[in-house]
Amino acid sequence: MLYRNCLDSEDFAIGYLTVDEQWRVTSCNRKGSYILGVHASAIIGEDCRKIFAEDTRFQEICPKFFDLNQQKSSSNFIEFVSAPRINDKVHPIKVRIITIPGKSGTIVGALIGFVDLSEPLAASRMILNSIAEGVFTVDQNWRITSFNRAAEDITGYLEEEVLGRSCKEIFKANICKTSCAISDCIHEKRTISDRTAFIEDKEGQILAVKISASPLVDMLGNVIGGVETFTDITQTLQYELILDAVADGVLTVCPNGRITSFNKAAEEITGYSEREVIGKICSEVLLASPKPASCPLIICMEEKKSIVDKELFFIGKGGFSIPVSVSIAPFIGPDGSVLGGVQSFRNNTNQLQKALILDSVADGVFTVDRDWRITSFNLSAELITGWNREAAIGQYCSDVFCSSICGKNCAIAESLYTGTPVSNRSITIKDRKGKAKSISISAAPLVDQDGNVLGGVETFRDLSVEMYLRQQLKQKYTFDQIISKSPSMQRIFQILPEIARSESNVLILGESGTGKELVANAIYNASMRNDRPFVVVNCGALPDTLLESELFGYKAGAFTDARKDRLGRFAAAEGGTIFLDEIGDIPHSLQVKLLRVIQQKVYEPLGSNVSVQADVRIIAATNKDLRELVKKGLFRDDLYYRLNVVNIALPPLRERAEDIPLLIDHFVDKFRIEKQKDIAGIDEQVITLLMKYSFPGNIRELENIIEYGFILCPGGYIKPEHLPDTFDDDEQNGNGALLSSHRNLSLEELEKKAIELCLHRNKWKKMATCRDLGISKDTLRRKIQKYQIVNPVESS
């Protein structure tokens, strides 16, 4: 009776049934009668399985009842939860079965406890479903006992799908096995807040959530489970990851200037960690100023305006200055109030270093975009053009330079369209005052990492001084296209104008490669016949059988295949000049006809008996000793004397070694333009080798050596490894040629010559000359004064 009174107590919120071994109801308490909706007397003696089967709330439970007759002890304890949806409403039911043993140990019945979870939680469920955060509860076995609507929205699961299942099975969180928040809170009996975790939703998508957990306790303080709230922070976390992925430093502040966020790039640029600066005044951290009014960010918030790319200097954690470019904007609320501000900044150290480097370059440098507007302008560009940087940037390059090639021949346009550099092009520009200036330019396209052309860059050098010096040197050391400073060549330069003005025949003698054709050209250019033809005939290159017809022409029928008349070289040169190169190679039979042309000024074409008048000046050249050929009877003496009216003997290069540096510079300039390669010059070691070389091929060989070096050298200076393979052997064979050419000089004259050569080789750098000669600077100065050696640049 006492037992029954206890079960019928109003404080007892669980419905109970007792059944015998056949599942027949033997008793039912008042709460059980209420939950089942029947009077207790109506179900006494009835099979409880039939009663539960007729109630939709318990239909899922019925298959789980077992045959009590098979139970052998009272240790059996079964508990399970069902959550059927009835009329679109979830009705969670919790059932517990405890078997009752008899005296003999056999099972004589069972106590069935059940509770309708929807009844006591109805009010709290409404509250839970109104919460924006996901909320779920678990019992002590981590089985979910409630799941609010926000939890359904976040995870995609319905409540009936998760009730009674383990929370680990549902969420698959990354902290389940290591630091489960709800497990920790139950074991430690304390609340855990703001722990970040990653869970899986119903579709298997990973979600980032911020969770808090607390233990659930009954009225007696016993822990009966736990409750956990969670918020989807996936989007917020994405924003944070994006912010940390930005290359620029970004910080935000509240209205009073205190830092509220500080991304990773800001940490890297300043050296401060986010923990060190959060909550501190921005100006105190980055500007080392206690006055917020000095902070541009505070000023922007006060004035409600933005700043873009303002140049500032921050103070890093180590106390060093950091050049930065900052952009600032205030956060404006809907009512117009300032909620805070954001500042992004970029480390300009590399750009500043590049700008300083560019400003230290002696050449002018500027860049343009694809619209030809100038985007950068270095200090040398300012000095050469007269434009200051601020005025030039943004202008069209043609408006600033007004060059002779602006338009179709623009070098920077050519580099942009072709995608290849343009090197060492000489042009004329006008400075800001309108004065013409000669400059040398090089241009190249500016491309990004994907090869897209963004603009162009051009470097330019003022050639005014250089051109003046070159003109002075040319006036002193050149005649027409011939370059030399040797005394023997200077004497030839002095008489060439007189020779050119005369009508006499000229015989030019010299080894192969000494420039005989250049001398012939110079005589022609300075003569009165320079507006008439100049015909060159290489007598050694033509077969003997063709030479006569080539010189004098022929008539139709003169020989087989001579179908029509053809004029010869003398006819082509009528009124002008003919240059007979390698005159020593013409056959003896043709020498007679050539002598008649020289003596009588007439000739007969092949196959004709009619004489043709010849008004032609003859310049002949040979690398052979004609006197020796005359002695041997291979060359007519009368022809020799007719040709040798004016005799010009060109010295070989080994006898005019002082010309080697001048010729090297000339050929470097020539091939730099022809090859379009950025070769600055010749390495000093190469110059030393060339100065000692005998040059059996003379100037032509030197030209070939420089051209070979241009082919192999990728850029910069031509070095010994860029010389021909046979050069070393040739140099060794001719090592003493330079000294042997001056063997008749006195000791003082040899010393003077050695000092001059060394000065030229080192481009008049006296310290380098002292090192090569092994003498002091004072000794060198005394020797220069003694021998009256003059720097040609200074003298000009």
Image (tube, helix red, strand yellow):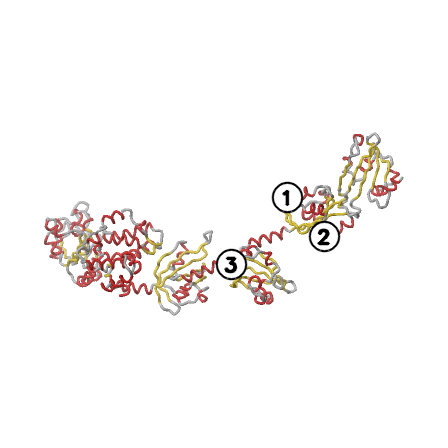
Give whichever of discs 3 and 1 has the lower sequence position.
1
Identify the image quadrant of residue 68. Answer: top right
Sequence-earlier tag: 1 or 2:
2
Residue 131's tag is 2
Crowding at mark 1 (Cα within 10 Å: few <14, some 14-19, many 20+) = few
Q: CA distance from mark 3 to mark 1?
A: 42 Å
| Observer-nearest of 6 and 229 | 6
Binning the other alpha carbons within 10 Å of mark 3 as few (below 14), some (14 to 19) or many (20 upward) gives many
Quadrant where the N terminus lies? top right
Q: What's the CA distance linking mark 2 and mark 3?
A: 46 Å
Residue situated in front as seen by the camera: 440 or 584: 440
**Whole-percent x, y for residue 322 in the image:** 51, 60
Residue 676 visible in the shown view = no
Residue marked by disc 1: 204
The residue nearer to you, when weighing 30 against 277, is: 277
Q: Are marks 3 and 1 in contact (CB under 8 Å)?
A: no
Residue at left 60%, top 52%?
A: 238
Q: Position of residue 502 (x, y in %)?
A: 16, 62
Tell me where residue 149 appears, x and y as whole percent: 71, 49
- Whole-angstrom CA distance, mark 1 to mark 2, is 25 Å
Which disc is residue 347 wearing? 3
